[in-house]
Image: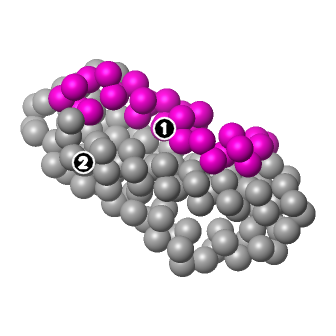
Amino acid sequence: MSDLAQQIKQAMGSHGCWKLQLSEAVAKGRLSSSSLEISRDDLCTFGKWLRQLSQDPVVANAAEYRLVVEAHARFHKAAGQIARCVENGEVEAAAALLNGSDFQKISDRLTSTMADWRQNLQPGVSHGA
């Protein structure tokens, strides 16, 4: 497996963990970061990794990479909306958004674009980040 394929696999796991942390924050009614920070797609480990990859023109010009970047930004925008509800004490609304089909579709889209990217990598191609 190429380095990039392994990194994508790890990023998929990171996304799942991050989503679980958001779910726990909604359940507790307490965030560990502000909704503004959660809305940003460049502050999480995955987002930082994506930004770092943009320095590699081969990766940055790949359609799959661009789709992942776009899906990741949409995910954080939706997560930020959920976080704003928590900040405003609207925990039931936050839970409804978190468990709603729109957020699930956005999250699933990010996961599927990462899986597609990983699957479409050329065998033996290694991109360090």
Verify whether residue 40 appears in magenta: yes
Give how far across and how far down residue 94 sits, in percent: 75, 68
Callout 1 secondary element: helix
Q: Indicate whether 88 appears above or below 45.
A: below
- The kind of residue on which mark 2 rests is Glu
Verify whether residue 72 appears in magenta: no
Q: Residue at x 40, y 34 (%)?
A: 50
Give how far across and how far down residue 60 sits, in percent: 26, 33
What type of secondary structure mainly makes up the magenta span?
helix
- The answer to whether one can see residue 56 in this image is yes
- The answer to whether one can see residue 28 in this image is no
Which quadrant is home to the N terminus? top left
Q: Which residues are magenta?
A: 32-60
Residue 115 numbered mark, or none:
none
Q: Indicate whether 83 appears above or below 124.
A: below
Which residue is identified by label 1?
46
Q: Quadrant of residue 33?
A: top right
Q: Indicate whether 121 appears above or below 30.
A: above
Give how far across and how far down residue 88 sits, in percent: 87, 60
